[in-house]
Image: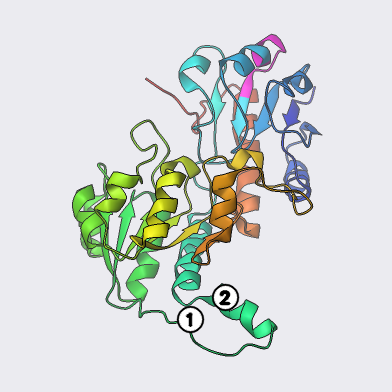
Amino acid sequence: MAVKVAFFDAKSYDRDSFNTTNKDFGFDIHYYKERLSMNSVDLSKGKDVVCIFVNAECNPQVIDELVKNGVKLIALRCAGFNNVDLKYAKGKIPVVRVPAYSPHAVAEYAVTLMLSLNRKVYRAVNRTREGNFKLKGLLGFDMYGKTVGLIGLGRIARELVKILNGFGMHVLAYDPYADKAFCEQYDVKSVELDELYANSDIISLHCPLMDSTKFIINKNSIAKMKRGVMIINTGRGKLIDTEDLLEGLRNGQVGCAGLDVYEEEQNFFYEDLSDKMIDDDKLALLLMHPNVILTSHQAFFTREALHNIALTTMQNIRDWADGKVLKNEVTTK
């Protein structure tokens, strides 16, 4: 009998990618537009697996309902797992994820944000479409010779390092578990956070969201940065305290910000709200800032990444169904 999968927060591109991949697996997938929460958890009744994305709510109450409904596996189709209460899930239901779908996609997008902010590409396009061809206000800087500070040196950040080397940039990195051999090979200087803050022209976030990294960018850390610093976040929204970032933008301590994530994004991202008022003051202010680029968690969004996400997710489910070791299981102490 085919494994039954409740697929939450399903978009058209998810269906296309997973349906194509599922031809080789034969799972019974039920797609739901709702994201997993207490309001939608009843949709998991009679299913063996739930497949969820970054904005699902998987707290103790939801986990209890999943177990009650007969669900035996939580399959994240993403790398991050901060939205799942792993401690509570331990011993009740295993959790698997996709640890590396396309580090190239996210690294390339981080560079896209850097270049777009630096050279004011988004402002220039809007101007020329209106017939304004003046250059005033579009001044940027050479990336060559500048210093980028990376908080986190995992798969994505290591791909980013290779790209930045091509620009002739200096790279600082903070990561308690930094790969020393990699740092030596690519001339990355491993430093403490304060040194990174003080010497970086651009700071890019690539660390997981944990208790120790929540709001790692805040008023205290911003005060230690170079005046006019560029901040890039393609990781998780709650790595940045938005109110403190806004204040940094207001007083000029932060020169610009490229954000593909937002701390309360689950209420907005992946939906078309163009005919509604944004009822989040901090988000509205970010959208109004001329020196902020805010996109809707799309850094991962390439054909290659979607294929890899579907393939790894399906294989995770197959391994569980076959009683094999779950190599991509997320565990907690």
Locate residue 79, reporting x and y percent: 51, 41
Residue 310 quadrant: top right
Q: Nearer the viewer, residue 25 or 144?
A: 144
Tell me how many marks there are. Answer: 2
Give the number of the disc on residue 324. none
Q: Mark 2 is on which residue type?
A: Arg
**Compared to 55, does 88 lie above or below?**
above
The image quadrant where one finds the N terminus is: top right
One can see residue 26 in this view: yes
Of the two numbered discs 2 and 1 on the same chain, state the one appearing first in sequence. 2
Q: Which residues are magenta?
A: 66-73
Give the number of the disc on residue 138. 1
**Compared to 319, does 53 lie above or below?**
below
Locate residue 163, reporting x and y percent: 40, 68
Few, some or many residues within 10 Å of mark 1 (<14, 14–19, 20+): some
Q: Nearer the viewer, residue 176 or 241?
A: 241
Give the number of the disc on residue 123. 2
Residue 69 included in the magenta stretch of the image: yes
Q: Residue at x 55, y 21 (%)?
A: 94
